[in-house]
Structures are given as structure tokens and as C-alpha cells.
Amino acid sequence: MLIEKSKERIILGIDPGTVVMGYGLIKETGNKIELISLGVVKMNHLDDHFLKLQRIFERTTSLIEQYNPDCIALEAPFYGKNIQVMLKLGRAQGVAMAAGLAKGLPIFEYSPKKIKQSITGNGNATKEQLAAMLKQLLKFTETPEFLDATDGLGVAVCHSFQKISTAGKGKSYSGWEAFAKDNTKRVK
């Protein structure tokens, strides 16, 4: 009798920031997830914005080389009133994406509201509520120094939950033509 091994994948979640970047890594085996690591990259000591971007790229690359994730999930910048802050966050996210793309990894993006909704059931949950739920889900007790670490971890868990919740539901298609061919009654 052949027993099929549950597929494993490692997900790197990143909460990009130019002062503190949070990250979390989980291992997903079937429908189970477990914590591998979480932490932050502090950049408040760097004055130059481009040095901060270089640090994000280098640290993301280092995490990829150390843990060999199968994909990267990023928190999308939220829309605020300050254009300069949005520009800096977008650059931070882009640099983290570039590090993953340079290593050939697929990139996924989730809004803060989607992340909170998928983990706590409330899209308006606080960072503290998100951290508390992650501690329960992944059974860890230490409280990270910065909530950015649990935010990064939350992105990874959110990505895992998308796969788990859609497992066995539907099929993915390579494009519109493939979808239309399989769904002639649904396409007008």
C-alpha cells in the first residue's frame, strides 16, 4: 500500500516598513501550520532611505537563502493620507518583492483588512488582537518586541488559509480561454 506524504511548503510573510520590517515563516503540511521563525529588521538607525531599501533587500534575500521558502506573502500598503509615507512603503514592498523575484519565488499580496479578517474573523481587529490569535493558532508564548513581527507572521498564515479554505473547491485555469472551454454554460 502506498501512503501519500502530505505536501509541505514554507511560506515567508513580510510586513514591509522602512523603520521596522516584520517577518514570519511557517511550515504548512496539509492543513496544519507550524511556526518556524518570526522577527523584525530594524532600520531606525539608518538616515538614508536608499540604505533602508538596501537593508530590506539584503535581509529578505538572507531569509530566503536561510529558510528556502516556497513563496512570499506581503502585506499591501494601506491607503493613507500622506503620499510620502505611501511612496516609502510602496518602495519597501517593491524591494522585498524584487528579492523574492530574483530568487524565482511566487509573490502574493494581501490587504491588512484581509489578513485580520482571515485570522481573527474581524477585518478591523487591532494588532494586539491579531498577535493574540496567532499565539493561540501557532502555540507560542513569547511576545515579540514589536508587533510588526506578528504582522509579518499574520501575512504568512493568511496566505496559508487561502489555500486551505479553497482546497478541493474549483480548479485553476491558465487563462480566459481555458476557463471558457470548461465552462461553456456559464459564459455568454
Image: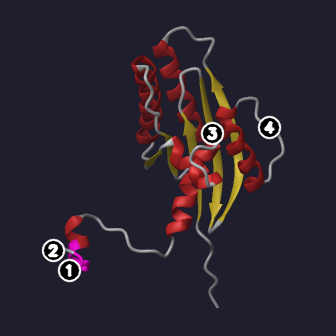
Q: Amino acid at mark 3?
A: Asp
Badge 2 or badge 4: first in the primary sequence: 4
The 10 Å Cα crowd at callout 2, few under 14, some 14 to 19, many 20 or more, is few
CA distance for labels 2 and 4: 54 Å
CA distance for labels 1 and 4: 52 Å
Query: What span is in magenta?
Result: 180-186
Q: Which residue is mark 4?
A: 143
Contact (Cβ within 8 Å) of mark 1 with mark 3: no
Mark number displayed over residue 92: none
Q: Quadrant of the C terminus?
A: bottom left
Secondary structure at numbered mark 3: helix
Q: Which residue is mark 1?
A: 184
Question: Residue 64, relative to residue 52: is it above or below?
Answer: below
Q: Is residue 136 left or right of residue 118?
A: right
Q: Nearer the viewer, residue 55 or 118?
A: 118
CA distance for labels 1 and 3: 42 Å
Q: Which residue is mark 3?
A: 151
Badge 1 or badge 4: first in the primary sequence: 4
Q: Quadrant of the N terminus?
A: bottom right
In this rendering, does residue 67 appear at all?
Answer: no
Secondary structure at numbered mark 2: loop
Q: Amino acid at mark 1?
A: Thr
Secondary structure at numbered mark 1: loop
